[in-house]
Amino acid sequence: MTFTAAASLLAGRSTAFVSRPTALKTATRSMSAFGRSMTMNAESGQAEVVLVGCGAPNRGMGWYHGLQMVENKCPSASLDFVVEPWFMGPGAEGPGGDDFKECQAEWESTYGVKFATSMQDLPPPAAPRLALISGRTADNPRLLTECIANGSKCIYLEKPGAPTVAELQAMKDEAEAAGVEVLMGYNKNVCKYVSKTRDFAASVAGSHVTFVSNNAYENTPESLGECFERNAEGMLKNMAIHELALLVSFYDVSVENIESVTADKEFSSMQTLAGPSGKEWTDFDKIKFTITTKNGNEVSVSADRCGGTDSYATVTKGAEEKFRYYMPDEDDKKLVDELTSKYPTAMPYFFTQDPDYITVKERVAKHTVDGKPAEGIATIGVAVETLRVAEYLTPILQEQLK
């Protein structure tokens, strides 16, 4: 959700956008004028990454992806270009514009990253090109077409990929016809808490798994209204789409294989609220439901926009909870505290999922370079089925909550 901005998008400015490492990567980066004869940044064994949709510093997922790459957290990924039409165009003087300019100046001068307003402005690839699309969901079909046309070998597409199943399926078909692989930013597929929960549940016959996702929005009409408008595709296609991807990937959940879905009415809540534009939006601020499949699997999902910063999963048998594992766990909480101190105005969920964002980007970047399978990374095929499930469930759950 990065190309459009609203006045409430930024809660404040961070005193620093990036931490400068002692050994700067700029030693190998050309600082020549932007043009088709410029020297690329990517070194041998690295993908040339184009970040499509940086968004507002401290708020945009694209910005955080870029931050991890300029800080060399992903060895196989070299952030060479940022394509950002909003903050380098109509949004330059609006909310977040000054923050973006400051970030752009630092990334250009310190790390040699080049900025542009469109993929068409970039020179041809000088290394295997990975396009990381982190723009508004509604823009993704067009952005994918532009990335394919401008030399991308592989595309990392942020969830949910497209507003509708039909659009995402068309994107899948277009990429396959062009011989371009599309992998998805479903980071929870590689999360420690997911693998540990699945392993424990497999050891307890008759157990039941619940995946719990929380965000830390203020529980006010203003905060949730802004959230509903900025994430207009709705909770199941946005916040809870990661959990649906887990169900598709590991629990045989598909539209055709769903026997039943039941909302927890005591927990769940659906509201109609005005966003910053004044337009009203109806969405879940929290939802919990259980899916039973035709082949006998049963699994639950819980998502709360105002539930805090932790995600976790539980394994129960009957009424007894047998296992619970958090993201972050105790080992990762120190990192969360360090990142919170370093970037105090950034979205808290960036930090709890920081190691997993790195894992997904590194695996996709390495795959772009060497062609070996990107272990555990969801394909666009998984994303199509996940979006199908989200579209199928939304009206059913809305009707149950009326």
Image: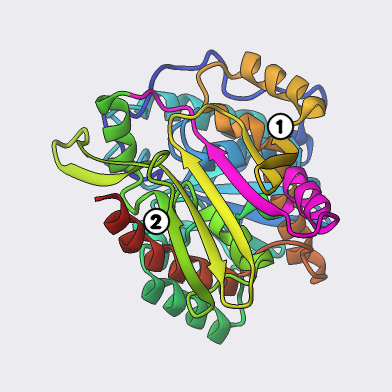
Q: Quadrant of residue 94?
A: top left
Q: Given the current orientation, which residue lies at the most extreme bottom position?
A: 177
Q: Is residue 144 visible?
A: no
Query: Label 1, on which residue?
Result: 328
x and y percent of residue 302 in the render?
52, 45
x and y percent of residue 138 in the render?
34, 58
Counting residues from the N terminus, which is met first, the one under dot 1 or under dot 2? 2
The answer to the question of whether label 1 and label 2 lie on touching residues, with beta carbons closer than 8 A, is no
Tell me what residue is drawn at x 61 percent, y 55 percent. Answer: 186
x and y percent of residue 51 in the render?
55, 50
**Would residue 400 be found to the left or right of residue 300 on screen?**
left
Local secondary structure at mark 2: helix
The reply to whether the magenta stretch includes residue 278 is no
Local secondary structure at mark 1: loop
Q: Is residue 354 visible?
A: yes
Q: Assess disc 2: are there few (<14), some (14-19) or many (≥20) residues with their C-alpha within 10 Å of its C-alpha.
A: many
x and y percent of residue 52 in the render?
49, 52
In the image, 69 versus 318, the foreground residue is 318
Task: Kindly identify the amino acid type of the residue bearing the numbered disc 1.
Answer: Pro
Query: Label 2, on which residue?
Result: 137
Tell me what residue is drawn at x 58 percent, y 36 percent. Answer: 64
The reply to whether the magenta stretch includes residue 211 is yes
Disc 1/disc 2 C-alpha distance (Å): 27 Å
In the image, the segment drawn in magenta is 190-219
Task: Kindly identify the amino acid type of the residue bearing the numbered disc 2.
Answer: Thr
Q: Quadrant of residue 1?
A: top left
